[in-house]
Image (tube, rainbow, N blue to C red):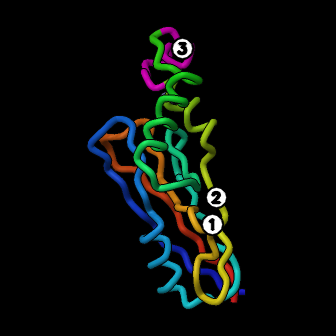
Amino acid sequence: MRCHTEYLTFHTRKHREYVHITPQVDAILGRSGIKEGMALVSAMHITAGVYVNDNESGLIEDIDQWLEKLAPFRAEYRHHRTGEDNGDSHLKALLIHHEVILPVTAGKLDLGTWQRVFYAEFDGRRSKRVIVKVMGE
Ligand code: ZN
């Protein structure tokens, strides 16, 4: 089995942002030369995530509102006793999860018709990284 590893860097302008990264992951897969296996895409942070879903702007707004409803910004999180103010960002990241594994078949990401890969930023305006590790033959 071979492995090919690259890193994506994000510095979002907004505090919360959802970035479509399927083209970047596809390009890394192409450079890997791996034809059969899988690609791990994993946020290297505790206030960001990676998910698979539709690249549709209304849905992305719905996801953002749903996360804010389930894990709203509040001043009184115990985490804020550390001097931080991003308690909601940690909770939103838990809901989305931090990584996905994508199947690779015949040298392509073997995704369903509407499946796209997204980086979800919950505490942006600073540099964050995602690791992409392609494993296979
Ligand atoms: Zn924090």
- Residue 108 shown left or right of residue 30 in the figure: right
- Residue 108 shown left or right of residue 103 in the figure: left
Q: Residue at x 54, y 22 (%)?
A: 69
Q: Give the residue at mark 1.
A: 40
CA–CA distance between discs 3 and 1?
Answer: 32 Å
Please name the amino acid that badge 2 sits on: Val
Q: Give the residue at mark 3.
A: 77
| Callout 3 crowding tier (Cα within 10 Å): few <14, some 14–19, many ≥20 | few
Disc 1, disc 2: CB below 8 Å?
Answer: yes
Q: Position of residue 2 (x, y in %)?
A: 66, 86
Q: Give the residue at mark 2.
A: 100
Q: Give the answer, above or below, for where 76 lies relative to 115.
A: above
Looking at the image, the residue that sits furthest to the top is 76
- Residue 76 shown left or right of residue 125 in the figure: right
Residue 75 falls in image quadrant: top left
Please name the amino acid that badge 1 sits on: Leu
